[in-house]
Image (cartoon, grey):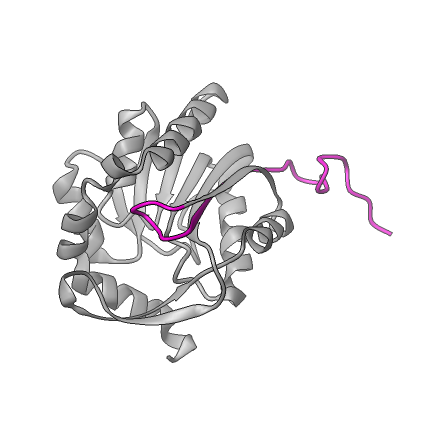
Amino acid sequence: MDMDGWLADTRASYDTVAADYAAQVRDLLNETPYERSALALFAELVLASGGGQVADVGCGPGRITAHLRGLDVDAFGIDLSSAMVETARREHPGMRFEVGSMTELDLAAASLAGLVAWYSLIHIPDQEIGPVLAQFRRVVRPGGLVLLGYHVGYGARLKTRGYGGHPMKVLVHRRQPLHMAASLDGAGFTVEAQMTLTSAESPLGAIVFARRRPDGTGTEGLPSHSA
């Protein structure tokens, strides 16, 4: 796979499968009580901190965005695939969905109370995880909360056929919780909680809550010092 073209391949693949993907995942949260609990806790924490806008990055057909809206969170969705965004707008009229890439978010600095990336980091190459998390940090306000879901494991596999039997060309990356926690720490987030689980979302998945540290603080929340 041409790693230089991974973003274009991901966009084209999800443009192709958008309708079938939406049909397959539409009611998936009904089968995943632990994930529903994580989303409810995320909503509770965001609202307790004063609320504000929350971006569902890699929102697909908008099911997580809509679920958060149902929990009184001011959520909106962003997705790389224009077909996914069209599907989300059709399935959830009146909600905000826009085309965009997590590699270069078109959002103002510190404009978000929180951010969700729900199994949407799985196609990001290892060398791009740091820059993507740096984008998350830029747009989330200090003290803001990030909720990530991802597949646990090692390495990546090439997915050539997907939802509805349509052709795809995407690498599906699996990562270890310790590595993800270290990446978040390096990007300026403090991991507050994480868990692994098996469910309809993933044979082995992980959910992590992380909070953006204030500028100028180290990993323990204390002022950092340079030599």
Tell me what residue is drawn at x 59 percent, y 48 percent: 181
Pinpoint residue 46: horizontal percent, then vertical percent.
Answer: 45, 26
Tell me what residue is drawn at x 22 percent, y 50 percent: 85
Pinpoint residue 106: horizontal percent, then vertical percent.
Answer: 40, 50
Q: Is residue 74 magenta?
A: no
Query: How many tags in the picture?
Result: 0
- Which of the two residues, 161 or 216, is positioned nearer the viewer here? 161
With 216 as the anchor, is 97 left or right in this view?
Answer: left
Q: Is residue 206 magenta?
A: yes
Task: Place residue 39 in its image quadrant.
Answer: top left
With 37 as the anchor, is 164 left or right in this view?
Answer: left
Q: Main secondary structure of the magenta part?
A: loop
With 129 as the anchor, is 165 left or right in this view?
Answer: left
Pinpoint residue 164: horizontal percent, then vertical percent.
Answer: 13, 62
Task: Place residue 142 in its image quadrant.
Answer: top right
Pinpoint residue 82: horizontal percent, then vertical percent.
Answer: 22, 56
Tell me what residue is drawn at x 52 percent, y 52 percent: 133
- Look at the image and tell me in which quarter the N terminus lies: bottom left
Q: Is residue 110 visible?
A: no
Magenta residues, as a range? 198-227
Which residue is most to the bottom? Answer: 2
Relative to 205, say whether 221 is above or below: above
Q: Is residue 227 visible?
A: yes
